Amino acid sequence: MRRIAFLSMNDLTDFVCDDDLARPALAERGFEVETVPWRADVDFSRYAAVIIRSTWDYTQHLQDFLHALRRIDAQSLLLNPLEVVEANVHKGYLLALEAAGVPVIPTRVVARLTAEAVPELRRALGGGELIVKPTVGANAVGAHRLPESLDADALADVVAACDGTELLVQPFLPNVLTQGEHSLFFFEGALSHAIVKVPKAGDFRVQEEHGGDIRPDPRPAPDLVAAAHRALTSPPFGRPLRTALGRERPPLGAAADGQAVAAVAGAPLYARVDMVRDAAGQPRLMELELVEPALYFRTDTASPGRFADALLARLGPPGGGV
Ligand SMILES: Nc1ncnc2c1ncn2[C@@H]1O[C@H](COP(=O)(O)OP(=O)(O)O)[C@@H](O)[C@H]1O
Ligand SMILES: [Mg+2]
C-alpha cells in the first residue's frame, strides 16, 4: 500500500467532514490514508502525497499555514499544488477571473470597511443590498449583510464587527435564499458530482454548520456546468480541459481588456465551483475553491471512486516512478 496523508486540523469538533468515505475507494487502488493535522511536526516524506482536506482553521493563521505547506511541499507531493493554494487563499483571485471574462459576482476589495464608504460601494455595485466578507475566509465566518434599510447604528455594529479586516464587497444575491448555492465538483478537470446548498429559514449562510440543507443535484443545469468549466479553464487557474473524447482544449486565454492574466503553474487535483444565480437567472461565480473544499462524498456514492481514480492518474502506478 502507498501511504498518503489527508491534511486536517487538530480539532474537527463542530465541523462536518466526510473525507473518511474516500478511504475504501483509495484502499482499492492501493492507497492507505493517514489523517494528519497541518501543524503536526512529522516527516512528510513518508507520504507519497499530502492532500489538503479539512484544514478549516487556517484562515486565522494564514502565514503559519503557508509556512507549513512550504515545508510539506519540500518533502512530498502537495495537492493541490502550492502555487495553486497560494493564489487561491485570498479571494482577490475573483477579480482576476472577472478580468478574464468569467461571470463572477461583481466584487470590490476594501482594505477595511468604513461607514462613509458604504454609499459609494452600494452605487458602484448596483444599488441594492450588499454583503461583506473577509478576503481570507471559510465557512461564512465574518460575512455580514448590509440591507439598504440598514440604519447608522446597525452599520456601525457591522463596521465594528469587521474590525479593520480586509474585505470583499459584493451585491447580495437573494436567489441564495430560495434556489440556494450550487457546488460542482471536479477531479482532474472532469465533472464528478454536484449539490445544492440552501440556508435554513432566517439565515443566508448555506453551510451545514449553520443549519443549511445539502441536496445532491444529479443533473446540474448545463449553464452551471458551462460556467464552472469557464472558471476552471480561464486564467489564472486555467488549464487544458479534458473533453469526453480525451482531447484537450486550450485555456480561454486573455482578459477582456486584452491584458493577459498570469497563469498559475500547477493544476488542481480537485476543485469545487460555487455559484449563485443573479436576478437575471445567470450563474455567477461565488468561489472557486481550490484549497480545502468539503467534497460532500456522501451525496454521490460513485464520487469517492472518481476521486481515487484521479489521484491514481496523478501519481501513476505503484513503483512507476514520478
Ligand atoms: N454575494 C452573495 N450573495 C448572497 N449570499 C452570499 C454572497 N456571498 C456570500 N454569501 C453567503 O455567505 C456564505 C459565505 O460566503 P463565501 O463567499 O462562500 O465564503 P466562505 O465559504 O469562504 O466563507 C455563502 O456560502 C453564502 O451563503
Ligand atoms: Mg463558500
Image (tube, rainbow, N blue to C red):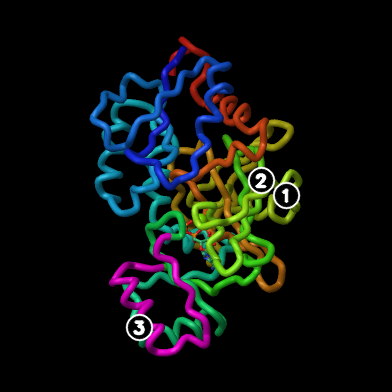
Q: Quadrant of residue 299?
A: top right
State whether label 1 is within 8 Å of ligand 2.
no
Q: Earlier in the sequence, mark 3 or mark 1?
A: 3
Bounds of the magenta segment:
141-167
203 part of magenta stretch = no
What separation in Å lies between label 3 and label 1 (alpha carbons)?
Answer: 41 Å
8 sits left or right of 306 in the view? left
Front-most of residues 199 and 73: 199
Q: Earlier in the sequence, mark 3 or mark 2?
A: 3
Q: Amino acid at mark 2?
A: Ala
Disc number for residue 176: none
Instruction: Say if mark 3 contacts mark 2, CB within 8 Å.
Output: no
What separation in Å lies between label 2 and label 1 (alpha carbons)?
Answer: 6 Å
Q: Earlier in the sequence, mark 2 or mark 1?
A: 2
How crowded pointer 1 is (Cα within 10 Å; few <14, some 14-19, many 20+) is rated as: some
Instruction: Say if mark 2 contacts mark 1, CB within 8 Å.
Output: yes
Q: Amino acid at mark 3?
A: Ala
Q: Is residue 278 above or below residue 225?
A: below
Disc number for residue 194: 2
In percent of width and height, residue 106 lies at 54, 70
In percent of width and height, residue 153 lies at 38, 87
Check disc 3 and report the residue beneath it.
156
Q: Amino acid at mark 1?
A: Pro
Front-most of residues 150 and 135: 150
